[in-house]
Image (spheres, rainbow, N blue to C red):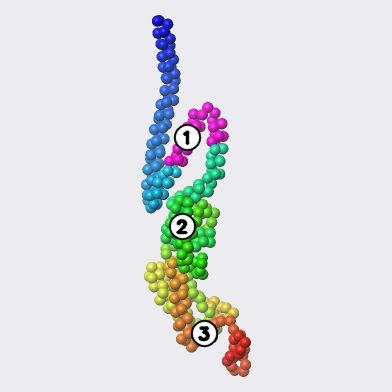
Amino acid sequence: MDGYFSIAAESLEMMWQNLQAIVPSIIAIVVLLIIILVVYKIASKAIYHGLRRTVRRKDEIKTVMAIWRYIFLFIVALVLILTFSGSLTAAGISIGLLSAALGWALQKPITGIAAWMMILIKRPFKVGDRVIIDNIKGDISDITMFYIVLSEFGGTVGGEETSGRTILIPTALLFDKPITNYTLSDAYILDEVGAEFTYETNLGKAEKIMLDAAKKFTKDAIERKGKQPATRVFFNPSGMQVKVRYNVAARERQQVMSDITREVYEKVMKEKDLEFAYPHTELVWGRRPLRLQGNSLKA
């Protein structure tokens, strides 16, 4: 019996010694896990509140939080493997190869997510802005994690009127393509309407007609921007080029340009000392000039 008791005592003593040897490691692991959990909770709360200020859609917030959770777990796994691995070199090489393979396979999705995060943080544009991305024009109707949804303008027609088509642009393209935002600072852009008049025309009257037309159709822009339309005059081979420049709401550009053009045309056609210049041939015979139009001469 004494032999059995001695064997049991020796076994218990060995177990106690082994337990004493691993207790520091267990305590270290528990403390490390507590620290990791606290860091995760604090970081998650900060990210969540930041997203609530910039992201409207709840599903996108949930998606970002899920991505953050996986990234955090991946980092924790790397740290634990490197800390408790018997061979740090071998573990580092394996993890490096795995990371490279995953990065190559998920290059486009990761780039898209990074571009989406850039949009949320830097705010180069927002829903409702009028933009040109990779020569594609449109009004932004939605911004998702992997696509920007554009309501196209132009495209099927000349000018900048809505075509009715919807275009999806991958967010991953944003790092490689130029972006033009019509409405980043405000809703107004500078535009112009030009007309060419003969050298014999009353230039001052022509400028006044064009200025009055621009003021008539851009009253709202003048009030908001505080800038009046202005004219610019240039020499051309066939006559004097007069351009009126004005601020206009980006989405009204085409309509306002058409309205000003029609107004200028109707006013000029009523004036005897104003005449539009256009390509033609004029022959002077005696005192009466003859103009060649088509195949016939007209006085």
Q: Residues within 10 Å of mark 3 (few under 14, many from 20)?
A: some
The quadrant the N terminus occupies is: top left
Residue at image coords 51%, 32%: 82
Q: Amino acid at mark 3?
A: Glu
Q: Is residue 263 above or below residue 77?
A: below
Residue named by callout 3: 275
**Mark pair 1, 2: CA separation:** 37 Å
Judging depth in this view, the residue of 234 and 181 nearest the camera is 181
Residue named by callout 2: 149
Q: Secondary structure at mark 1?
A: helix
**Mark pair 3, 2: CA separation:** 47 Å
Q: Secondary structure at mark 3?
A: loop
- State the image coordinates of residue 7 (x, y, percent, origin top left): 43, 9
The picture quadrant where one finds residue 10 is top left
Q: Earlier in the sequence, mark 1 or mark 3?
A: 1
Q: Is residue 294 above or below residue 15?
A: below
Q: Nearer the viewer, mark 1 or mark 2?
A: 2
Judging depth in this view, the residue of 2 and 111 nearest the camera is 2
**Is residue 28 a member of the stretch shown in magenta?**
no
**Is residue 90 a member of the stretch shown in magenta?**
yes
Q: How many marks?
A: 3
Q: Earlier in the sequence, mark 1 or mark 2?
A: 1
Q: Secondary structure at mark 2?
A: strand
Residue at image coords 51%, 65%: 155
Q: Nearer the viewer, mark 3 or mark 2?
A: 2
The quadrant the C terminus occupies is: bottom right
- State the image coordinates of residue 5 (x, y, percent, origin top left): 40, 8
- State the image coordinates of residue 3 (x, y, percent, origin top left): 42, 6
Give the numbered dot on residue 77: 1
* Region rendered in magenta: 69-96
